[in-house]
Amino acid sequence: MSFTNKYVVLDSLEGLRSLPDNSVQCVVTSPPYNKLGLREGRPYLGQIIYDTYDDNMNEDDYQKWQLQILNEINRILKPGGSAFYNHKDRRFCKRDHPPEKFLSDSDLELYQTIIWDRGSTVNQNARYFRPYVEKIFWFTKSISGESTTPKFHRDRLPEYFKGVIWRIPPDKRNKHPAPFPAILAEICILTTTEEGDLVLDPFAGSGTTLVAAASLKRSYLGFDISSKYQKMFHQRLATSKSKVHLWLEHHHHHH
């Protein structure tokens, strides 16, 4: 069965397990916060869910699940491949829970941590500083405990995205609940893949990663349990006209 250029309605872990070792060049993804069905109801613009939930919602289960996902990603990545995993700190029980703690237990090697500066937040909680930023963990494959060097072409980017803080406002024009803007996926894909390489998003949602991959002439594969999102993705792909937001934004970017 060919997995190229498909959006498969399938549980993420099942999907990953069906892939052969060393088969994917790049993963770009943002996991749903927990398994309690909140993925479907992801709020638009800024995902207020885990800023406002102040309880430990099966945190252990969530972490175990994510570690299974990450270990499968390590298996299916090609040597020299990259995985970009977008996550923010979760807040519950009146404190901050950074994901670094559990991420360090995965088989993947953490290569670099990128900060995504959204510039604004819908979180109006006055008890702490406004949480504008999210993290993007850039992982590489480890082979029996040894890290591999990722393919990387920083020179393909405009100057203002060459640093470790990416200032990208959430895409207000995107009618779909997307965890990150197209431009963010484009940066990850453009720098770590060549045309024709396979890009995977195991939590495909409305398909931001997949549309970005297609626009950059890469092959894509997405898994999600929602057939509603699959339909949404096919509509987006049909209307995207292969535009690359990275180049469109080029002339009116504010530093």
Image (tube, rainbow, N blue to C red):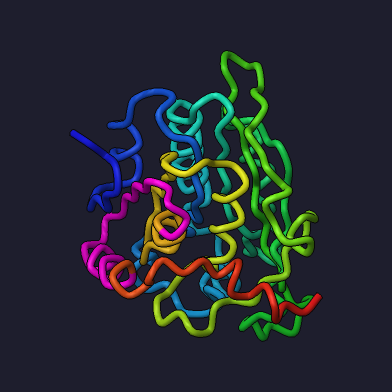
Name the residue nearer the viewer: 210 or 241. Answer: 241
Percent x, y of residue 218: 42, 48
The vertical placement of 199 against 20, above or below, is below
- Residue ranking furthest to the top: 144
Q: Residue at x 62, y 60 (%)?
A: 90
Q: Which residues are magenta?
A: 215-236
The correct choice, above or below, for 244 with respect to 214 in the image is below
Q: Quadrant of the N terminus?
A: top left
Q: Nearer the viewer, residue 168 or 162?
A: 162
Residue 147 x/y as whole percent: 66, 22
Residue 105 on the magenta segment: no
Q: Nearer the viewer, residue 126 or 155?
A: 155
Left or right? Give the position of 197 relative to 161.
left
Residue located 62% across and 38% down the image: 139
Q: Look at the picture and state if 71 lies above or below 214.
A: above
Please provide percent x and percent y for residue 181: 54, 69
Identify which residue is drawn at 45% across, 79% down. 174
Give the residue displayed 48% in from the left and 30% down from the top. 77
Q: Is residue 234 magenta?
A: yes
For residue 159, side relative to residue 33 (left or right) = right
In this view, the residue farthest toward the left is: 1
Q: Quadrant of residue 118?
A: bottom right
Tell me residue 97's x, y (percent): 68, 55
Quadrant that contains the C terminus: bottom right
Taking the image as shown, residue 197 lies to the left or right of residue 245, namely left
